């Protein structure tokens, strides 16, 4: 069961209309290492986790990722909502615009639609938690590339917050992996 | 949204974020009493702040009590909030 809280997790400030930056940030809305992939990945992996710590962590980080997906959608929206047609024409956002108008849509910066092929759930907690730790590092790297190309102080501030969250999640997944390994070793009798 | 509502919303966001952090930490450190005290203190603060906000400006979650008309639909919605005020 989920319940919606009618607020963002972190403030989203955009200083200047910028359809090109929106088209790049959409990587984290529908790209392989984006927030949607993260949320669906973690929430899907919960059923086969062997310890309560790991079940709780996947539930709570998966839920936080959906809040981050909302933040990214809001960044994209605020970057394009006031854009004129002339400000959109000739930018990388033009191809998005002819299909989706100004609505965010889960595809990556190159326009490839989001797919469950980006994620996995192996039914093996060791494999899954390693995938999750790698996913957090890949998302951190993506945020660093985005921060490098952002020339909007408001956008950069929000991207920095999201980058920090990847590091915290990586840390927590590492702790869950150690707890799960301990549990699996405890169950072996020779 | 006026300054007073924004100030209350920002305080809810700050305390809410603290609770996200204690939540994730406690998931892998469930016996850390210091973290539990921090979580419980701010859990109470969060309830107080959201009750005040919801009474003044409308529901943040559908499970709350509303006067007529149904205040849950009140704007601005999260993606419409101007945080620069």
Image (tube, coloured by chain):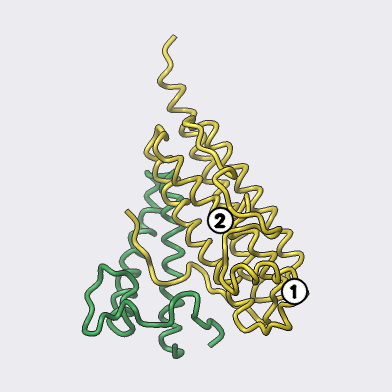
Chain colours: A yellow, B green
For disc 2, the marked residue is A35
> Which quadrant of the structure image shows residue A107?
bottom right
Residue B31 is situated, as x and y percent measured from the top left of the image, at: 37, 44
Residue A143 appears in the rendering: no
Q: Going 33% across and 84% down the picture, which residue do you hit?
A: B57
Nearer the camera: disc 1 or disc 2: 2
Q: Residue at x 47, y 70 (%)?
A: A8
Q: Give SS at disc 2.
A: helix
Given contact means CB atoms under 8 Å apart, are the residues at marks 1 and 2 in contact?
no
In this view of the protein, which residue sits in the foreground, A29 or B55?
A29
Q: Subunit of mark 1?
A: A
Task: Residue A64: give its label.
Answer: none
Q: Which residue is mark 1?
A: A151
* Chain identity of mark 2: A
A125 sits to left or right of A164: left
Q: Is residue A161 above or below residue B85?
A: above
In the visual, does B68 lie left or right of A35?
Answer: left
| Total labels drawn | 2
């Amino acid at each position: 069961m989920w319940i919606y809280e009618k607020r963002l997790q972190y403030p989203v400030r955009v200083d200047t209309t910028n359809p090109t930056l929106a088209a790049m940030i959409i990587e984290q809305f529908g790209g392989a290492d984006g927030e949607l992939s993260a949320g669906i990945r973690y929430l899907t992996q919960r059923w086969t986790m062997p310890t309560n710590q790991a079940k709780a962590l996947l539930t709570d980080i998966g839920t936080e990722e959906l809040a981050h997906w909302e933040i990214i959608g809001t960044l994209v929206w605020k970057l394009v909502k006031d854009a004129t047609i002339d400000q959109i024409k000739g930018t990388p956002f033009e191809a998005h615009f002819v299909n989706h108008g100004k609505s965010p849509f889960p595809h990556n910066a190159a326009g490839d639609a989001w797919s469950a092929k980006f994620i996995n759930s192996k039914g093996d907690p060791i494999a899954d938690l390693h995938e999750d730790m790698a996913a957090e590092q890949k998302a951190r790297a993506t945020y660093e590339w985005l921060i490098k190309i952002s020339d909007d102080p408001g956008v950069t501030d929000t991207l920095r917050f999201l980058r920090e969250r990847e590091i915290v999640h990586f840390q927590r997944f590492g702790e869950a992996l150690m707890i799960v390994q301990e549990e699996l070793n405890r169950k072996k009798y020779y | 949204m006026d300054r007073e509502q924004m100030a209350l919303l920002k305080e809810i966001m700050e305390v809410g974020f603290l609770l996200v952090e204690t939540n994730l930490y406690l998931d892998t450190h469930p016996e850390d009493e210091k973290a539990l005290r921090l979580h419980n203190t701010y859990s109470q603060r969060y309830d107080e702040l959201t009750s005040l906000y919801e009474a003044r400006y409308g529901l943040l979650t559908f499970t709350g009590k509303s006067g007529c008309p149904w205040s849950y639909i009140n704007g601005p919605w999260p993606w419409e909030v101007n945080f620069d005020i």
